[in-house]
Amino acid sequence: MSLFWLFLIILAIALVGYVLGRARALSSAGGERSALHSLPSYYGANVAMKAAVPAFLLLVIWLLAQPFYVNSEVSGLIPDTEIAEGSSRDLVLAEVRRAARGLENAVRSGAMTEEFASNARADISDVTTRLKEAGQIVTSEISQPILIAAQRYRSLSSIGNFYMSIAVILIAIGGALWGLRETKAEFRARNTVELGMRAILVGAASIAILTTIGIVLSLVFNTAEFFRIYPASDFFFGLTWAPSFSGRGGTSELGIIPLLWGTFYISFVALAVAVPIGLFAAIYLAEYASSRVRSTAKPLLEILAGIPTIVYGLFALLTVGPLLVSVFGDNGIGIMKAGTSVMTAGLVMGVMLIPFVSSLSDDIINAVPQAMRDGSYGLGATKSETVKQVILPAALPGIVGAVLLAASRAIGETMIVVLGAGAAARLSLNPFEAMTTVTAKIVSQLTGDADFASPVALVAFALGMTLFVVTLGLNIVALYIVRKYREQYD
Amino acid sequence: MNEMPKFEQATEMTESKISAKKVQVYYGDTHAIKDVDIEIQPRSVTAFIGPSGCGKSTFLRTLNRMNDTIDICRVQGSIKIDGEDIYDPKVDPVQLRAKVGMVFQKPNPFPKSIYDNVAYGPRIHGLARNKAQLDDIVSSSLQKAGLWDEVKDRLSEPGTGMSGGQQQRLCIARAIAVSPEVILMDEPCSALDPIATAKIEELIDELRANYTIVIVTHSMQQAARVSQRTAFFHLGVLVEEGSTDNIFTNPEDKRTQDYITGRFG
């Protein structure tokens, strides 16, 4: 039975449970709605919830757990001799799974009979040719242990799926019956449904948090693996970034300093552009603009935030870069060699951050109580005096928070850097030279054809982890400042 | 008793501080203030009373052009302070507000130190030539507001950390520091407890010697306690204006009578 049908069956049981529960509630009160504790639909929802939620939970857990169980069972069938030099048990298991899927598909398309597919003594070359003929790609000749393992894998999976269907449907029916048994006039269905809603919402929130933890864990393990084969001190304090993709374990120099330097340099230029412009725009919108100007200008400014960063990257590559070269290049001042530079990427990234800074600052400035402005105007202060001496000091912690949030976005930005700043890791003070950042290097380390177990590829995780820690730190500081500020007026 | 109104009429005509004629205020399409004529006397306290939404705060805010900060608000008619029309295009509203100070309903000290709160106005108007002069202005303003003894040892602490009554007196000191001639008070005690209210009322009575004070209040007892003249507003119209004693003991208009006896509002 396919998952889709199982899904539909559970839904059907829940739906029937809903209708029955509703009817049963009404009849238990003798058709008198007012005698019920809750509205009839709550009784129905209670039954449907008890039918569907545990069943779906079981389904999900079973689907997650079954592959582990089957893998460990099948893994035992593969002798160590079967694992070739330079390969691993995981790779052989992947081969087994491919073969099992091939058998399954071949049977379904009629290229093999069920007996043939599960015949342990079948001729290996015959199986291989038949699989190939059926269009099921098999990478190499299947060996005897792999065939046996694949057959075992197939049978375990199908048995597992069968029991899963039975168990899930039984749970659904059981849940529906339990819900129906509860359904009496005095049963507090409304409160139970409320609890159920709460559980569903908590579930949604925890999935988001668990995913974050999962991402961090996946980074941590790979980072630890990297530091096992490459000294951490060389990584954190090395002044050269020169990965060697060619030789296995060749003399790669993977110092993070040039990348961090590029990251912070470009972010600094970006913030130097975005903070004054964004802040002044926010002050104009919040304090000076009439409500008509504000209602058109603010959405227009926020459109900037909706432009994909790759488009900004193109803008940097095609417009800003050549423009800067024409002024600072060989025909002009002569300190810029090519269109890709820290300045190009920084300027464009600054433009990208303007709406970010202005929108957040605008909210913060608006949160400064009107009484502050009145107090200042009432003493005969002008608008700019009021902004400078009362509003900005009051809003400063919030604005600092907004700037820090913008900084963490700048540090994490990739596409503008790839297109605007070049790919050369360099320690230089000249903002018109090409440099690169941590994020751009992560992309280039992982998209090459380097062996995934080599330091040249694994360094990407260490880079990612470093970046994660830096931006997390910035975000925590920013949130702390913003929260502290909020308490002041509430 | 009968001669009193006549006598007052005469004084108003000659030396009123603020003179408003045919004042209309519109919020967008709403006609909030209709045909208000009033003469406000110097060095006295005038109270505006009336039910909520009657326009008394709106009218108060026209006297130092605070309504300019609201986009949709329009003012017509003439308001003269010392014979000068304050809505004349030549008048700078910023200068006007230094002359006509304001104290608001809720104490609104700036999130700065007590000293900086009081020094704020003198600093932006350049009233002090050096630090010593500024110190003098701050201490004398705080003394006039009756706050000096309570705060003289903690001038560098934030003004927001004081009690509500102290904050309101700080706001009064802040207004006094720019040496205004008129002080407008928009329900200055509505957020305060009775003891703090009593202190503010006492202060208002002392300030009367040097300043022209206009106070909006919801409390008729307060109007009776602190003011020499009272104006009753209802639905955007100035119903009756006269000496406080007269208004409270012998109102001419039926609506005033009903309001002060608590029949509506």
Image (cartoon, coloured by chain):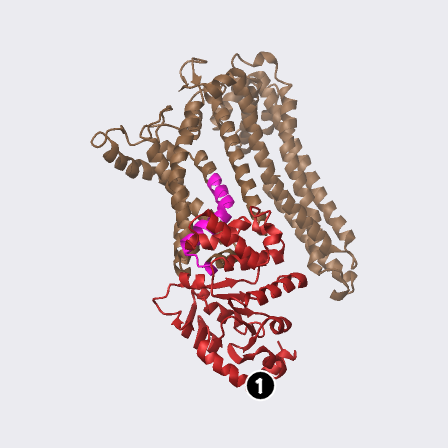
Chain colours: A brown, B red
Q: Is residue A467 above or below residue B250?
A: above
**In the foreground, B181 or A415:** B181
**In the foreground, A343 or B228:** B228
| Side of B254 relative to B94 (left or right) | right
Residue marked by disc 1: B252
Q: Residue, x 52% and y 29% (percent of image)?
A: A111
Q: Which x, y percent locates residue A39?
A: 71, 61
**In the foreground, A240 or A222:** A240
Whether residue A87 can be seen here: no
Residue A18's image quarter? bottom right
Q: Secondary structure at mark 1?
A: loop
Q: Is residue B79 above or below residue B192?
A: below
Decide whether residue A386 is among the magenta residues: yes
Q: Residue, x 48% and y 17% (percent of image)?
A: A234
Decide whether residue B113 is among the magenta residues: no
Q: Which x, y percent locates residue A85?
A: 52, 12
Q: Residue, x 78% and y 52% (percent of image)?
A: A181
| Side of B112 relative to A59 (left or right) | left
Whether residue A398 can be seen here: yes
Dominant secondary structure of the residues highlighted in magenta in the image: helix
Q: Residue furthest bottom?
A: B2
Q: Could you tell me which chain the residue with mark 1 belongs to?
A: B
> What is the magenta range?
A377-405
Crowding around mark 1 (Cα neighbors within 10 Å: few <14, some 14 to 19, many 20+) is: some
Q: Residue furthest left?
A: A331
Q: Quadrant of the N terminus of chain A?
A: top right
Q: How many marks?
A: 1
| Side of A184 relative to A93 (left or right) | right
Q: What residue type is disc 1 on?
A: Glu
Q: Is residue A389 above or below residue A444?
A: below
**In the foreground, A366 or A164:** A366
Q: Which x, y percent locates residue A424?
A: 36, 25
